[in-house]
Amino acid sequence: MRAAAISMPKLDKMPGMVFSAKELKGTGHSLLDDRTQKRRPKTFGMDMKAYLRSMIPHLESGMKSSKSRNILSADEVIQWSQSLEKLLANQTGQDVFGNFLKSEFSEENIEFWLACEDYKKTESDLLHCKAEKIYKAFVHSDAAKQINIDFHTRESTAKKIKAATPTCFDEAQKVIYTLMEKDSYPRFLKSDIYLNLLNDLQANSLK
């Protein structure tokens, strides 16, 4: 007598099944990715902890980030409060401050400042082309991301880029730096973005 074929139910459709981490490895879909995706903030009004996790990938676990040699420390973040210069000297500091400026709809300031820093490293034969792009993006009166500078500085910069040199944006960059230093930077130090990041790092260091 032939034995009746037994149809085995598919494991992935059985209710209540629990899989080990080893079994889930290599499936091409991470449950952690699902949770992270659900936590990812879509506006600045969403959960700040989720925002901080997206900025500092391994903050809570203490794991070393694949993109940086050192884990961000509370001491580093405290140093950001000493001066805008120290804040902008740190790559993560630039990112966090940039996101704060986005919440205030003034991200063009740090974008212009960073563009100027990059411009100074440009090879001489590419200066004119890059200067034109920066001018049209940030300085021109019809620029999509027009920075807030006075008429004299705007006109002076327009003249300087005609014979582009590594310093032709220095005057405008200084105006924007001063604006951030006196206006946005003090508010940043009192913001939830900065204070929650600092508190999380300090709490993490005590574990």
Image: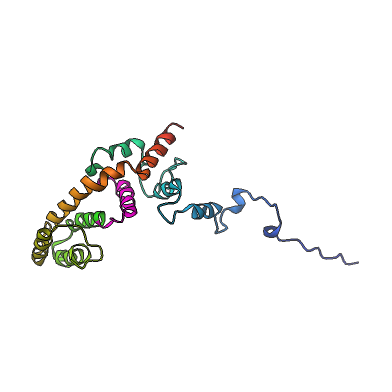
* Rendered image quadrant of residue 173: bottom left
Screen quadrant of the N terminus: bottom right
Rendered residue at 22%/54% (across/down): 113
Is residue 197 one of those drawn in magenta?
Answer: no
15 or 148: nearer the viewer:
148
Q: How many marks on residues?
A: 0
Tell me if 166 is positioned left or right of 102 in this view.
left
Query: x and y percent of residue 174 in the render?
Result: 15, 51
* The image quarter in which residue 203 lies: top left
In this picture, residue 74 sits left or right of residue 31? left
Q: In the depicted view, which residue is nearer to us: 68 or 200? A: 200
Q: Residue at x 23, y 40 (%)?
A: 83
Left or right for 193, reference 136: right
Q: Residue at x 25, y 37 (%)?
A: 82
Q: What colouring does the structure picture have?
A: rainbow
Q: Magenta stretch: give its range.
A: 88-108
In the figure, is residue 9 to the left or right of 140?
right
Residue at the extreme top:
206
Give how far across and how far down residue 155 sits, in percent: 10, 63
Identify the image quadrant of residue 27.
bottom right
Q: Is residue 97 magenta?
A: yes
Q: Position of residue 75 (x, y in %)?
A: 33, 35
* Most common secondary structure along the magenta stretch: helix
